[in-house]
Amino acid sequence: MSFLKTHWNKVLILLLSILILFFAFSYTLDTKGKALIDKSFTQSVIVFGSAKALNAVISLAQGTELDLPFLTVAIGEVLDPVNDLVEQFSFVMLASMVSLGIQKIMMNFVTGDVYNYILFSCIVVLNLWIFYRFSRDERFRTLFFKITVILVFLRFAVPLIGLVNDFAYNSFVKQDYNIEQLNENIVEVKNQVNEVTVNTIEQKEEGSFFNKVAEKFDSNYYAKKVDEYKSAVDNSSEYIVALIIAFVFQTILLPLIFLFVLYHLVRGIFNLGK
């Protein structure tokens, strides 16, 4: 009992070390974290593909109408803003996939055998150093302690990013910005735009020569086409902006918060004792 009273802090560090090594080598958090990051990456690829498909059908629609100046302007007024927003959204999705790719690399790094054995060695040496002191070792002991703490933080913080992302999305984001539902909405917009375009092409190909000439001078025909495209892309901007919000929060904002915490942790640890 007297030993525990005298060395309770050393015993506490020893118990924490055993607990850390248990979770590090049991891969309890790693499997779930990897699965969530893989799921997010796959989801990002699917949404990115939907956005590019919408961009493609809009570009096709802009080139299928009759070659009349006022028609080109009218179609452009309807589709160009959506097309520009889709292109900007594509950059956001590219950044999201890069972020998730980096997270996957970091996950593989901190959960690999080499990292675990380095962490194991550092923790064992640290505990031996706590119980057995050497002369004039204060400086190196403190530095070694700081490095070990950072290794422990990275070992568990990186897998926790996926878990925190999933918790934050399901608890605070999904009810207003459901990525799966928004992606389905984008696909529906793409299908509607494509349907209008296909119908327009079929009308142009199947119509008689006199009908084609009449259509060129029929303002109602062009007004109808503009209305059809307006109806097809209705609410599409809202869907895209909502997806931007969801992915920026999930794949960019939270990792930046992690980097911010890591930076201040490292700086705080190395400023200890100064």
Image (cartoon, grey):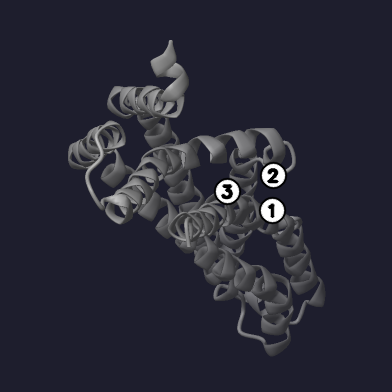
Tag on residue 242? 1
Q: Which of 127 and 245 is in front in this view?
A: 127
Structural distance between the alpha carbons of marks 3 and 1: 12 Å
Q: In which quarter of the image is residue 25?
A: top left
Which residue, given by chain and number where applicable, does mark 2 sit on?
Answer: 177
Marked residue nearer the N-terminal end (1 or 2): 2
Marked residue nearer the N-terminal end (3 or 1): 1
Which residue, given by chain and number where applicable, does mark 3 sit on?
Answer: 250
* Cβ atoms under marks 1 and 2 closer than 8 Å: yes
- Residue visible at 75% across and 55% down? 235
- Residue 141 location, x and y as percent? 30, 48
Q: Which of 125 and 97 is in front in this view?
A: 125
Left or right position of 17 against 60: left
Structural distance between the alpha carbons of marks 2 and 3: 11 Å
- Residue 262 location, x and y as percent? 48, 54
Answer few, some or many: residues within 10 Å of disc 1's Cα (few below 14, many 20 plus, some between 14 and 19): some
Amino acid carrying label 2: it is Tyr
Left or right position of 85 against 74: left
The kind of secondary structure element at disc 1 is helix
- Residue visible at 51% across and 67% down? 91
Amino acid carrying label 1: it is Ala
As drawn, 145 above or below 139: above
